[in-house]
Image (spheres, rainbow, N blue to C red):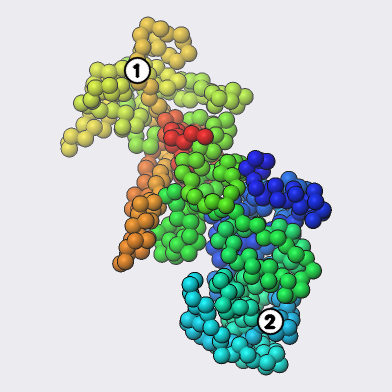
């Protein structure tokens, strides 16, 4: 992490210099109830980056205290995402590893008169809690004796009560100005099979109780989390103190990472997956790390993007163009340049020798000469983009039209001589002539043309599918959904978020493998899709276009 971008770094440096801490231990603690998204990348980069900078360690810990929403699939995906981003955890832990100790600490609270079993329903608990301006009132079960509470809590563990019939609550202060301190629930009954512990337990700790205990058990020195947990910090500290934990972690909050035109709610993302609006958590339209990976983003670009957003208490949304800027910067020296035709129109060069195929030399990446050169076949028949021809063009249109001459990238000048149409009047083929003297690299200076087109030789062209993406839900539509009384965000899903085009690529790409990345002349950066590419068909996801509106 950069020194001038991180107030957390300053706190930790002072802790070490003052002797308050002699080491740095952080943790990344996702709940395994979905796939990680770009917002989580910030927490990953901060926690692992801070620990690395101070020669400390970071644990990957799954806060798996809610078996109804959690799954081993999510555990595996999170591990893959963290490793793909380039980080190594010191220890792999689960909250469920500590269920027995958490239970013992809850018993300790009961013995100290700091917790009680409550029979109120969830709705009644909310009603008794009060509001931000009015204090809460005591539950009628708050005065149960220690012995009664110990007996009831033991019976909760043994499975004698149905879901929702009883909870264990911390006994703190129902008149507290911080509503989180008004006797929060710390255990509930849930007869559900847990992905890690099976049916061993039928009571599970609440996150607000479990999380500080996990940090303390693991010796975490700095518990770094987003500002949504700031109001829970007093409860975090209360749990650590009253449960008499030897280790005393310090919670520090930072602003969340939000991106414009991007759905960042895990609940909403799951709904998009479950209802089939996308083809999985790794759909390239999803802001999940696996979706970004499949789309073609690199771990380096995501790390650089997160670091550039800085670390502060604020949680403003950044422009999506900023994320796109960093993947362009990362790929411009790495990605081979090539030509692909997304919407093909055949061109026959009538004066080019029939049956002849010549090979043309082209740099693989002009910005990185060390990548060498490639050879491109050229013959009498080629494909160009349909958009590169207009029969009746406007002024300042410099591509193909009847009588106009253009340059073919790496090849020759060609001139449009004739237009072939089908019975419906649609243009299906162009007849052109070429000038043999104008070969690229020949030094020809006889005349200049203003248009340069990319192309693919027809006989050796490889069929390919190109997938172009737009935001699933635009910001203005997300706002409209929030303000609507009768519509949800699903009603505003962008039907044009995915466009599929069938075209051709150069034969030099015949061995392209999933996750290989290329820059297609004029079209942008593309990634070979790992999910839909087969031996018979290559599918490309467009990562970003070539043009950027973002300025650092």
Classify 160 as above or below 94. Answer: below
State the SS at label 1: loop
What residue is drawn where x is 40% and y is 59%? 277
Asked where in the image residue 217 lies, by quadrant, the reply is bottom right
What residue is drawn where x is 46% and y is 10%? 442
Mark 1 vs mark 2: give the one in front. Answer: 2
| Furthest residue toward top | 446
**In what quadrant of the picture does the N terminus appear?**
top right
Classify 105 as above or below 506. Answer: below
Residue linked to disc 2: 114
Residue linked to disc 1: 450
Whether residue 14 is visible, yes or no, is yes
In the image, 191 versus 523, the foreground residue is: 191
Counting the numbered discs, the total is 2
In the image, 130 versus 147, the foreground residue is: 130
In the image, 291 versus 336, the foreground residue is: 291
Classify 119 as above or below 272. Answer: below
- Is 276 left or right of 162, judged from the image as shown? left
Which tag, 1 or 2, sits closer to the chain's start? 2
- Is 191 left or right of 356, judged from the image as shown? right
Asked where in the image residue 143 lies, by quadrant, the reply is bottom right
Locate residue 115, reporting x and y percent. Answer: 66, 82
Q: In whole angstroms, how far apart are the C-alphas of marks 1 and 2?
A: 81 Å
Locate residue 199, reporting x and y percent. Answer: 64, 81
What residue is drawn where x is 45% and y is 55%? 263
């Amino acid at each position: 992490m950069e020194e001038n971008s991180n107030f957390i770094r300053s706190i930790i440096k002072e802790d070490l210099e003052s002797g308050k801490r002699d080491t740095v231990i952080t943790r990344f603690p996702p709940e395994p109830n979905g796939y990680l998204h770009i917002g989580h990348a910030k927490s990953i980069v901060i926690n692992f980056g801070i620990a690395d900078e101070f020669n400390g360690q970071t644990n990957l810990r799954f806060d798996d205290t809610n078996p109804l929403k959690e799954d081993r699939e999510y555990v595996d995906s999170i591990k893959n995402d963290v490793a793909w981003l380039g980080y190594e955890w010191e220890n792999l832990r689960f909250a469920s590893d500590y269920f027995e100790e958490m239970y013992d600490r809850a018993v300790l609270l009961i013995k100290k008169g700091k917790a009680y079993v409550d029979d109120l329903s969830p709705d009644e608990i909310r009603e008794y809690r009060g509001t931000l301006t009015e204090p809460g009132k005591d539950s009628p079960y708050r005065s149960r004796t220690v012995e009664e509470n110990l007996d009831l809590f033991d019976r909760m563990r043994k499975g004698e009560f149905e879901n929702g019939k009883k909870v264990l609550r911390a006994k703190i202060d129902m008149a507290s100005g911080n509503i989180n301190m008004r006797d929060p629930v710390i255990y509930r009954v849930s007869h559900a099979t847990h992905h890690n512990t099976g049916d061993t337990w039928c009571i599970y700790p609440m996150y607000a109780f479990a999380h500080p205990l996990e940090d303390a058990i693991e010796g975490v020195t700095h518990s770094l989390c987003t500002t949504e947990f700031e109001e829970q910090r007093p409860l975090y500290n209360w749990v650590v103190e009253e449960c008499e934990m030897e280790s005393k972690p310090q919670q520090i909050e930072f602003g969340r990472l939000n991106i414009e035109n991007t759905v960042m709610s895990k609940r909403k993302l799951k709904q998009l997956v479950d209802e089939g609006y996308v083809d999985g958590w790794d759909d390239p339209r999803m802001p999940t790390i696996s979706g970004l990976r499949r789309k073609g983003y690199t771990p380096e670009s995501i790390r650089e993007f997160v670091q550039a957003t800085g670390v502060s208490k604020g949680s403003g949304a950044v422009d999506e163009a900023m994320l796109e800027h960093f993947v362009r910067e990362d790929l411009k020296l790495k990605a081979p340049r090539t030509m692909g035709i997304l919407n093909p129109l055949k061109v026959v060069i009538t004066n080019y020798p029939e049956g002849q195929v010549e090979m043309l030399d082209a740099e693989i990446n002009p910005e990185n000469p060390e990548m060498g050169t490639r050879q491109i076949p050229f013959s009498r028949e080629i494909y160009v983009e349909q958009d590169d021809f207009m029969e009746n063009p406007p002024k300042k249109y410099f591509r193909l039209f009847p009588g106009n001459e253009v340059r073919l990238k790496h090849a020759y000048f060609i001139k449009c001589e004739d237009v072939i149409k089908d019975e419906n009047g649609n243009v299906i083929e162009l007849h052109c002539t070429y000038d043999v003297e104008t070969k690229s690299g020949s030094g020809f200076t006889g005349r200049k043309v203003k248009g340069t087109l990319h192309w693919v030789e027809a006989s050796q062209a490889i069929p390919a599918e190109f997938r172009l993406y737009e935001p699933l839900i635009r910001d203005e539509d997300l706002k409209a959904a929030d303000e609507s009384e009768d519509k949800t965000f699903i009603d505003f899903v962008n039907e044009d978020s995915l466009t599929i085009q069938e075209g051709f690529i150069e034969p030099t790409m015949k061995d392209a493998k999933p996750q290989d990345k290329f820059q297609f002349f004029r079209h942008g950066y593309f990634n070979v899709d790992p999910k839909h590419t087969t031996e018979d068909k290559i599918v490309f996801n467009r990562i970003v276009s070539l043009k950027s509106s973002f300025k650092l």
